[in-house]
Image (tube, rainbow, N blue to C red):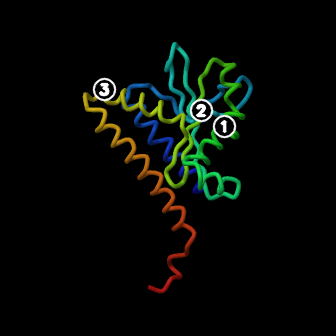
Amino acid sequence: GDRIKRHNAIRDSIFLFSSFAAWAPIKEKPFIFSGSSERPADILVPNVSLGKDLAVDFAITCPLQHKYLVDSSLISGFACNDYAAEIKCKSYQSRLQAEGIMYLPFVLETFGGFSDDMLDFLSKLISGISSCFSEPKRIIYKQVYESLSCTLMKTIARSISSRFDLFSVDI
């Protein structure tokens, strides 16, 4: 339900921005692994570097989970970086590299933190959009980050409000 909707909303936002950058992104490309229906590339960006494709795999995690709580209170972005390394990379990175595809786990925290690997990707994305539209990078930067933030917060708010039966509340 809500987790998938949140994931897909963030994916769709980055897909749209990747299209604006003229990267020719492919959403949910099937059969990356021979004989498998797994889809580790929520977005596949063709020919991103030296003829290699880039598989971008999205996830959203909460830093208030018991396993992250202590470290997240001390280290900014701990939950998303740990999730990227321990869950996403361990599942797909070496297998994608064997197929000649670069891998980027694009992990956000529910409070807005994001994995370290995202910075370079977003910087290149913003440069690409800036070039295509002849707009200053600072303007595109602001629009991309605002869009991601609003999308994340809107989907979290919907998730919270869906837990209440609003018709049974006396107003």
Secondary structure under tag 3 reads helix
Q: Nearer the viewer, mark 2 or mark 1?
A: 1
For marks 2 and 1, the one nearer the N-term is 2
Q: Nearer the viewer, mark 3 or mark 1?
A: 1
Amino acid residing under circle 1: Ala
Residue 56 placement (x, y as % from top left)? 56, 33
Q: Read off the residue under disc 3.
A: 132
Q: Depth check: 70 or 122 in front?
A: 70
Residue at 63% over, 39% down: 84
Q: Which mark is residue 2?
A: none
Residue at 50% over, 17% down: 49
Secondary structure under tag 2 reads loop
Amino acid residing under circle 2: Ala
Q: Read off the residue under disc 1.
A: 85
Amino acid residing under circle 3: Cys
For marks 2 and 3, the one nearer the N-term is 2
Which quadrant: the N terminus? bottom right
Residue at 48% over, 52% down: 152
Give the alpha-carbon distance from disc 2 to disc 1, as whole Å: 16 Å
Q: Read off the residue under disc 2.
A: 41
User: Answer yes or no: do the residues labelled 3 and 1 have beta carbons within 8 Å?
Assistant: no
Residue at 55% over, 40% down: 115
Residue 160 sits above or below residue 12 on the image: below
User: Which residue lies most toward the bottom here?
Assistant: 170
